[in-house]
Amino acid sequence: MAEGLGNHRPLAPRLRVPRIGPVHWMGVHTLLRRELRRVWKEWPETILAPAFSTLLYIAVFTFALGPDLETEAGRQAFAFILPGLVVITITERAVETPAFSLIFDKLEGSLGDVLMPPLSAAELTGGYAMAGTVAALSTGSVVLAVVALAFGLVPVDPLALAFFAAGGALMMTLVGILIALQSQKWDHAAAFFVFIVVPTTMLSGVFAPIEALPGPVAAVMRLNPIFYVIDGFRAGLTGVHSAPVGLSLAVVTAAIALLSIVCGRLIASGYRIKP
């Protein structure tokens, strides 16, 4: 009996296997942190440069209006333009962040490292989308802070302002993911930006109220989801809006839901991301 006990080997300690719930939060957080490190590492180019470009636009409009800026009509025109310029900054940064990151990983062959962990398509989409949203709001916050301090703007409805800023950033981040999935080289992404993103953003009620545009142009513009982002953001900042705020909220929410489903399906199928 003693001999048998002496030959008995102690049981090896059991390894603790981390439990993964319905959402792999650690994996999503790791992906989010990885993407944001890219943004913060190059913050002069990713945060300050886009903000500086928009502030130059604002300066140009200020000098262009000249003495008219002191009139009631001039102040109204300037107050109408400012929210649109802030949203343009947010949307452009939102599209660029995931698009450039995903395309770089595809071309460098490092995307496999992202696809290897046990992350679902929805979790991958969420990680990239959150990173792009945070980067876009960081840039937009710089512009909004300068505009608010320089021109004494106080948001009329901070809740609406926050929703349409975050909703617009998230919506356009998902567009950036779609561009990256479709693009096989940098030229493809540049074509999407030049021929789709920029015209769609500029033709969204940034510089003129939709009521002042010809009927056909106004009808087409009402089909542009970015119009509702800008109109809702303008309502939150100045109280002026062309469409009902509830309608803008519904359109932006529906666009986010649709784009999320499309991105998730494409990533799940391995569309142009798996060999």
Image (cartoon, rainbow, N blue to C red):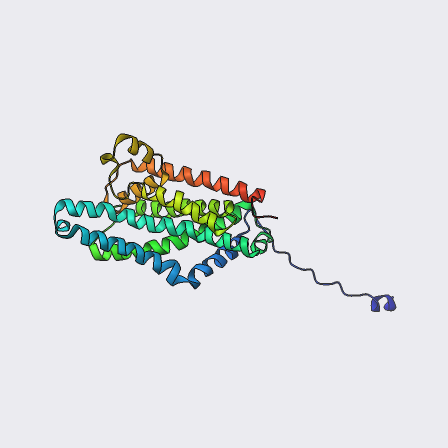
Residue at screen point 20% across, 48% down: 78
- Depth check, front residue: 50 or 24: 50
The quadrant of the rendering that contains the N terminus is bottom right
- Whole-percent x and y of residue 77? 19, 45
- Asked if residue 208 lies left or right of residue 117, the reply is left
Q: How many marks?
A: 0
* Residue at the top extreme, as displayed: 215
> Dividing the picture into quarters, in which one does residue 256 lie?
top left
- Whole-percent x and y of residue 121? 55, 45
Residue at screen point 44% across, 47% down: 176
- Depth check, front residue: 204 or 113: 204
Residue at screen point 23% across, 45% down: 80
- Asked if residue 66 lies left or right of residue 171, the reply is left
- Asked if residue 261 lies left or right of residue 202, the reply is right
> Dividing the picture into quarters, in which one does residue 207 lie?
top left
- Whole-percent x and y of residue 160? 31, 44
Residue at screen point 44% across, 63% down: 41
- Whole-percent x and y of residue 95? 42, 49
**223 up-or-down from 134: above or below:** above
